[in-house]
């Protein structure tokens, strides 16, 4: 029950933060969407053994967290299930790739370990940058940005409705869970014999509720071309922000930042 409540609160918190009056919230959604796409493309193009460049790309997220008053720690807590999945997927690298490149004391460091940490970090950064986009941009603004890059209306509508129906789905799960607990108050969890019937009931109830919600939206004049809250051109402030961040990302991706900084300190001292 607490997990369901926490999930609902997390979605509401994301909506609240997206409508917050912060600096990043004032940047045009198209600019933020393009920056996110560029960042993910540059990040995924890094070689799987290039851990240093991958670490350098994290500087952008640290900068964004400071500017937007976003907590990386809280973001990692919210995404811990996804991060665990990334770790499980990457754990096979040290087993399959055993070429030794150096030693830390008597512990060998293989290319598999380097690639595991690189791929794990790339996954974490890609998820975090997407999460920060959602925290600083409402779903309506994201859909508006998608429309500006000529994404088909049907896909935009699907993206928006999926996001909005998450709350509907979670509340139906909550109702079914409460009803089940009232019928089996001393039982911990859900008995395996009831899994099939509960999942089927959840699916049918969710479909019915989603249909009611969609019909209510249509009665209120819902139209994929007119539901956007924010319709405006990209202003000069947003374009300046785009140019600065784009240059920063290019530098972090193609310039050995840590080597230059290390060389300066070594020369100095």
Image (cartoon, rainbow, N blue to C red):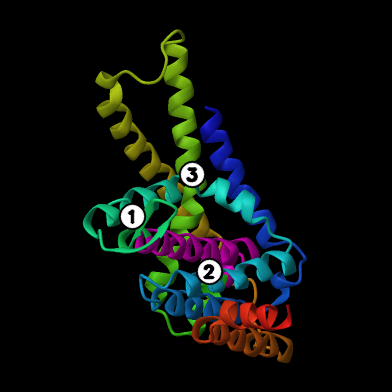
Give the residue displayed 26% in from the left and 63% down from the top: 99
Q: Which mark is residue 90?
A: 1
Disc 3 vs disc 2: which is toward the camera? Answer: 2
Residue picked out by circle 2: 55
**How far apart in space, not on screen, are marks 1 and 3 (Cα)?**
34 Å
Q: Is residue 20 left or right of residue 143?
A: right
Tell me the quarter of the picture where residue 43 sits: bottom left
Q: Residue furthest left?
A: 96
Whichever of labels 2 and 1 marks the residue nearer the N terminus, that label is: 2
- Report the magenta residues as a range: 114-141
Give the structural element (helix, strand or loop) at label 2. Answer: helix
Image check: 245 left or right of 175?
Answer: right
Residue 105 in percent (x, y) is at: 44, 53
Element type at mark 1? helix
Q: Decide if residue 167 is in sight here.
A: yes
Q: Nearer the viewer, residue 9 or 216?
A: 9
Please, is residue 94 above or below residue 41 in the view?
A: above
For disc 2, the neighbor class at 10 Å (few under 14, some 14 to 19, many from 20) is: some
Distance from disc 2 to disc 1, alpha carbons, whole Å, reads 17 Å
Please identify the residue farthest to the top as the structure is shown.
Answer: 186
Quarter of the image that includes the C terminus: bottom right
């Amino acid at each position: 029950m607490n997990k369901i409540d926490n999930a609902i609160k997390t979605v509401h918190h994301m909506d609240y933060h997206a409508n917050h009056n912060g600096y990043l919230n004032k940047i045009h959604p198209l600019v933020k969407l393009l920056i996110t796409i560029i960042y993910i493309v540059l990040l995924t193009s890094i070689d799987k053994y290039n851990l240093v460049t991958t670490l350098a790309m994290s500087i952008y997220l640290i900068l964004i967290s400071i500017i937007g008053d976003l907590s990386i720690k809280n973001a990692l807590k919210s995404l811990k299930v996804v991060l665990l999945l990334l770790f499980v997927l990457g754990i096979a690298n040290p087993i399959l790739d055993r070429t030794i490149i150096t030693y830390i004391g008597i512990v060998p460091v293989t290319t598999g370990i380097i690639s595991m940490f690189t791929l794990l970090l790339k996954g974490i950064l890609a998820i975090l940058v997407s999460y920060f986009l959602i925290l600083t941009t409402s779903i309506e603004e994201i859909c508006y940005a998608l429309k500006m890059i000529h994404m088909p209306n049907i896909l935009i509508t699907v993206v928006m409705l999926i996001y909005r129906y998450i709350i509907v789905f979670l509340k139906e799960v909550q109702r079914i869970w409460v009803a089940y607990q009232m019928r089996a108050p001393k039982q911990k969890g859900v008995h395996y014999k009831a899994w099939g019937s509960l999942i089927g009931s959840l699916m049918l109830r969710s479909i019915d509720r989603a249909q009611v919600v969609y019909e209510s939206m249509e009665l209120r004049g819902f139209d994929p071309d007119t539901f956007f809250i924010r319709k405006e051109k990209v202003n000069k402030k947003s374009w300046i922000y785009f140019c600065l961040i784009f240059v920063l990302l290019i530098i972090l991706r193609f310039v050995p930042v840590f080597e230059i900084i290390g060389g300066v300190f070594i020369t100095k001292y």
